[in-house]
Image: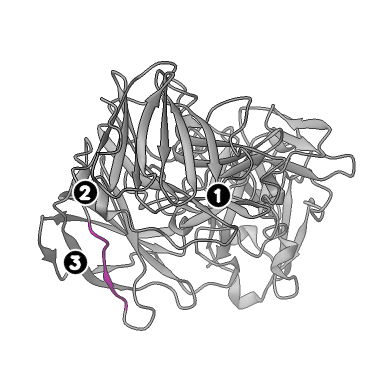
Amino acid sequence: MALMMLPGKALAAFGITLSGGAYTVDTNAGLVFKVNGSNCDITSIKFNGGAELQSSSKGSHIGSGLGSATVTSSLSPSGTSGVITCSTSTLTHYYAVRRNENIIYMATYIVVEPSVGELRWITRLKSSVLTNVPAQSDLRGTDHAVESADVFGTSNGQTRSKYYGNQQARDLTVRGVTGSGVGVFMAYGNRESASGGPFFRDIQNQTGTDTEVYNYMNSGHNQTEPFRTGVLHGPYALVFTSGATPGVPDMSWMAGLGLTGWVSGRGYISGKASGVASGVGALVGFANTTAQYWTTPDASTGNFSSPAMKPGVYTQTLYQGELAVATRTVTVYSGTTTTGQNITSTWPEPSVLWRIGSWDGTPSWFANSNRYLDMHPSDVRNVSWGPLTYTVGSSGLSGFPAYQWKSGANNPTTVKFNLTSSQIAARTVRIGITAAFAGGRPQITVNNWTSSIPSPSTQPDSRGMTIGTYRGNNALYTYSVPASAFVTGTNTMTINIVSGSSGSAFLSPGVAYDAVDMY
């Protein structure tokens, strides 16, 4: 039922009204928006009496639009807040507002994954009004497709895509776009019902005819774990300002709205993390089929305390950088802090003869690692991918590739290293990867000795390394090299990417490197 402003209340313009099949929401603070009463799309957004912000081509909506939904509205007994509820057989989406706040609070409950295959909120704004946008995902000025129908190039060889310039889930707080006298910002919420963990990246912006601001809660974009369903995603919020970046709004007030799937009873985990390599940051994560959380231990003591968590049994993971180095099981109880949940790295740290990179679960500092999140590998701003030769003891880390592909790009990678006569012995070579595409995996040759072909790692079915992320499933390859393979003086090891699959250049089988060492 649509409730008008209550008579006798000094509510100024705040209210939700139904007319002509649309709900008009006035926050009494400058924000007025309309919601289609048959499909839940936002069809108009105006701020401080200015120009229409909402795109005229499509509405702003959950998923790709619900098509049809049962849409109702209500005001709180005090008349100071309101909710629009949009329901289908498998999804319930909420818009909530408070008097004198220019914020659209949202939450989305799903029983099954949407048929489009991803759960996302899309704000579609006029790019003629919201003009200041992230450059990496600004498609204006591109004139040809580089890859699929979602990576585009300019005439000067640069690339743009909605996949570029996105933040990790652990960094999602507030991000948005601005124009003259107006800013529209997404506040992403706690991510507890999203999928992919703390290091996952997904689409946040795209600008073309429209300026789009997203909140992706799950997708098939290099997805490393199953989607969470039967849970409430959010809350999250769309915040409107005169252009300044806002703080994260307090969304705890929504606990009183009776939203399906809201869990108020929470508990905490505390303990100490230890054993992480010096100079590499630690993070402690928790995950089960209904929720995910993470926290950063104190850098000096290793002590940590979790955020408020839903009750249940979780896998607790210690990360060295982004590399999982220990797991254990913990149980969270409502209203209780479970103490003493210590976790210690079990990652092997042998005394090595040499190492390229560091065991942190990322290709950081390797060639093009300062660019791979922001552009396609073919972008002219990249330095040459190779094939590269890395000489232990004299090459910088930029002499080793962040990524390597089987065909037409940079296969093989060569590593040169010296051994004294006393160092000739059976040795172990370790190669860590953070992702792989099309079954790509490394095979090594040391001088005249060649390893067997290892099995492929288990990875998401996604392009991955061409869509702005190195994050898949970390895998470790270990090679036992006999003493007879080595010589006194200069030794040459080549790393070839092999696979039974094929492809050309950057869409051929490939890997993203973590580190390589020998002991």
Does residue 14 appear left or right of residue 322 in this picture? left
Q: Is residue 108 left or right of residue 238?
A: left
**Spot occupied by residue 508 in the image (x, y as percentages of width and height):** 68, 33
Label 1: which secondary element = loop
* Of the two numbered discs 1 and 2 in the rendering, the one whose residue sits closer to the viewer: 1
Residue 249 figure quarter: bottom left
| Residue 118, visible in the rendered structure | no
Relative to residue 195, is residue 268 depicted above or below? below
Q: Which residue is mark 1?
A: 48
Looking at the image, which is closer to me, 213 or 240?
240
Q: Which kind of residue does numbered mark 2 sit on?
A: Ala
| CB-based contact (under 8 Å), mark 1 and mark 2 | no
Marker disc for residue 255: 2
Query: Looking at numbered disc 3 in the image, what kind of residue is underneath it?
Result: Gln
Q: For mark 3, what is the residue?
A: 341
CB of mark 2 within 8 Å of CB of mark 3? Answer: no
Q: Nearer the viewer, residue 157 or 477?
A: 157
Q: Give the Cα separation between the discs numbered 2 and 3.
A: 29 Å
Say whether disc 2 or disc 3 marks the residue closer to the N-terminus.
2
User: How far, Cα to Cα, is label 1 from label 3?
Assistant: 51 Å
Based on the picture, tell me whether residue 159 belongs to the magenta stretch.
no
Instruction: Choose top left, top right, bottom left or bottom right for residue 66.
Output: top left
Q: Which residues are magenta?
A: 302-308
Give the percent coordinates (x, y) of residue 92.
Answer: 30, 28
